[in-house]
Structures are given as structure tokens and as C-alpha cells.
Amino acid sequence: MGELSEDGPDDWEGLDASAAHIANLLSTEPPDVKVGIGGFSMGAATALYSATCFATGRCGNGIPYHINLRAVIGLSGWLPGSRSLRNKIEASNEARRRAASLPILLSHGISDDVVLYKYGEKSAQSLSSAGFQYITFKSYDGLGHYTVPREMGEVSNWQRKVWGLRGLEESS
């Protein structure tokens, strides 16, 4: 992976291949199963890109995206294609509806020196301005490019809330 930059090129071919691979894996799930995806670093970038494919109904290469995502988690990552996302979402009522309904959790360490905090923060802002209404952004003082139990506890609690799970002891 090259260094991230605000005006650097996105690897559309790789992103589309990754999103299609994940969609193919998830396509074997029964229709009544609620499907969510998440990842760390490049995995987070792929998960967030998949969220945009879900909203628009297709990947950047035009191949339809048929997975009904119900939640997305991105840890210490970034949103590829953020510069053109708003126009893609605004182009379709269905894309606006899907974007508005998808819960997304983003978390990022302020001391991350691999994927800078500003990219995580900008990703949350780009998603929100494009019409994703259920964005939760958590930042962590002193956290670098790794996870800590507190962050994982908050991920677990967020999932319980999104999936409507009850009766499980909540982490602190």
C-alpha cells in the first residue's frame, strides 16, 4: 500500500475486486440472516467501500451489489472514493434511502501514525455529508494503529444495540 494522501488515486480495480469477493462470500447466507461487515485498516477501507456499493446498488465498475448490509464497522481505516461519494448517493432516491438506513461505526486512535486520525475523521464527515445518517465516530486518545479492550468493548456494545440483542452483559 502506498502512502495515503487526500488527493491520491484510489485503487478502484482492487476495491471492486475486494467488495465483490466479500459479497460473494456473504451471498451464501440465508435470506433471513442480518449481514454486517467490518475491518481494521485496509479491511476498514474495504468495509466502508462496500457500504457505498450497498447504498448505490453497484460497485464502481458497475457490477450490481446484491448484499443487504445491515451494519458496517471500520477501525483505524479510511473511506476510499470520498471525493465523489456525495454525487453518487444524491443521484438516486434508492441510494439516499439505503445510505440513510445503514448504521456505521468508525473508531480511530488519535495517535495512529499508519492511517492518520484525520483520515478517519474525514471519512465520518464524508459519509455523513453524503447522507449516511447513522454514523458513530469514536476517537481514542493515545491509541496508535492497534486496538485496545476499551475499543473492542464499545464495538461489542454498539453491535448489541444495532442488532437488538438483549440479555447479554454489557462491557464497560
Image: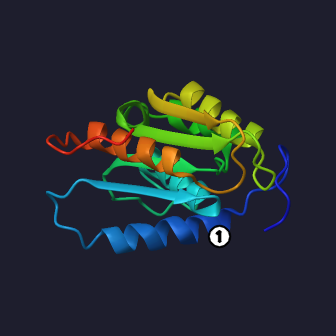
Q: Quadrant of the C terminus?
A: top left
Residue 147 can be seen, yes or no: yes
Residue 124 % position (x, y): 60, 34
152 above or below 161? below
Q: Is residue 56 left or right of residue 101?
A: right
Q: Residue at x 54, y 49 (%)?
A: 74
Residue 161 % position (x, y): 28, 36
- Foreground: 17 or 164? 164
Residue 1 % position (x, y): 78, 68
Q: Is residue 138 left or right of residue 165?
A: right
Q: Is residue 27 left or right of residue 6?
A: left
Read off the residue under disc 1: 14
Q: Residue at x 76, y 37 (%)?
A: 118
144 above or below 164? below
Residue 160 % position (x, y): 28, 42
Residue type beneath disc 1? Gly
Q: Residue at x 85, y 59 (%)?
A: 3
- Give the SS element for disc 1: helix
